[in-house]
Amino acid sequence: MSVLLSWLSATKVGRWVATTFALLGSLALIAAHFYAKGKTAMRTKHQRQILEDIENRRKLDADIDHLDDDDIAKRMHDHWSR
């Protein structure tokens, strides 16, 4: 291991190889960071949409609960029995 480290620090090619791997590693870390950030943003967006759908469903259920039987029958005939 010490032979490899001394070669990387003592020769021009070794320094070039070490610099190249350091840059590639840095780019990989940056890419992984942005990938994780985008994945988190998409998960948040999806969860927000689910919550909005649940809220809309709750409001619709509340509206239907306040209808009498004739209004429910009329809505079913108008919208669902085509």
Image: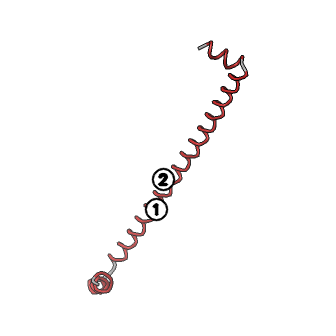
Q: Quadrant of the C terminus?
A: bottom left
Mark sitting earlier along the chain (1/2)? 2
Residue located at (45% from left, 65% from top): 52
Q: Position of residue 81 (x, y in %)?
A: 27, 83
Q: Secondary structure at mark 2?
A: helix
Q: Circle 1: is it few (<14), some (14-19), or many (20+) Cα within 10 Å?
A: few
Q: Position of residue 56 (x, y in %)?
A: 42, 69
Q: Are marks 1 and 2 in contact (CB under 8 Å)?
A: no
User: What quarter of the picture does the N terminus occupy?
Assistant: top right
Q: For the point 70% across and 23% down, which residue is it? A: 13
To which quarter of the image does residue 59 belong?
Answer: bottom left
Instruction: Out of 40 and 74, give the one closest to the viewer.
Output: 40
Measured as percent of width and height from the top left, residue 51 is found at 44, 61
> Image check: 24 left or right of 81?
right
Image location of residue 32, percent across then percent down: 56, 41
Q: Decide: few, some or many residues near mark 2? Use Cα within 10 Å; few <14, some 14-19, many ≥20.
A: few
Residue picked out by circle 2: 43
Which residue is outermost to the top?
A: 3
Which residue is labeled 1 in the image? 49
State the SS at label 1.
helix
Disc 2 residue type (three-letter): Arg
CA gap, disc 1 and disc 2: 10 Å
Q: Nearer the viewer, residue 15 or 80?
A: 15
